[in-house]
Image (cartoon, grey):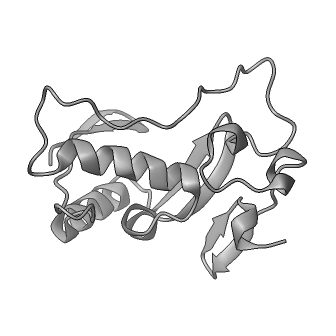
Amino acid sequence: MKLTHKAAGTFAIAPTPFHDDGRIDEKSIDRLTDFYAEVGCDGVTVLYAGRTVEAGATREVLARPLHPYTQALMRIATAGMSAGARASERLPTIAGESPDPGCLPGGCRFEPRCSERMEVCSLRYPQAFSPEPTRPVNCFKYGE
């Protein structure tokens, strides 16, 4: 994994190796966590269409994503980094299309694309539920 500090407050992260079963390599989590700490950040916030869907310690979010969007992102990343992946293979995608910023859904913004959506998801945006003490997740599957 190559970490490049581009400018104050911004950085780029090159591909991270993953296990064949989709888990992120433990050494890579350590290196990424160390890098975030070095630049003054020990947590991450995942956004979808301008709204927070999940937040937590970097290590926890990368190793055990809870929100369906974060899980989908990690599936895509792990598919591209698996030992058997070929450059010519297409990465998996998230079903549907990103919402139009001028016409966002009234409920959860990820609901039209979510494989775990429930009826309530289209009615209102979920509050932050805490399935774990330090892991707020805006998803009805964790509360209501």
Q: Return the x and y of residue 90 as percentages of the image width and height.
A: 26, 29
Q: Quadrant of the C terminus?
A: bottom right
Q: Image check: 32 left or right of 72?
A: left
Residue 37, image quadrant: bottom left
The mark tally for this picture is 0
- 13 or 74: which is nearer to us? 74
Residue in the image at 64% along x and 56% along y: 116
Q: Residue at x 60, y 44 (%)?
A: 47
Q: Is residue 112 above or below residue 138?
A: above
The spot of residue 83 in percent (x, y) is 9, 51
Query: Is 42 positioned to the left or the right of 34 in the image?
Result: right
Residue 94 percent coordinates (x, y): 49, 37
In the image, 55 versus 22, the foreground residue is: 22
Residue 25 point in image, percent of width and height: 19, 65
- Name the residue nearer the viewer: 122 or 36: 122
Q: Is residue 21 left or right of residue 74?
A: left
**Residue in the picture at 70% in, 67% down:** 141
98 w.r.t. 81: above or below: above
Which of 141/47 is in front?
A: 141
In the image: residue 11, left or right of residue 84: right
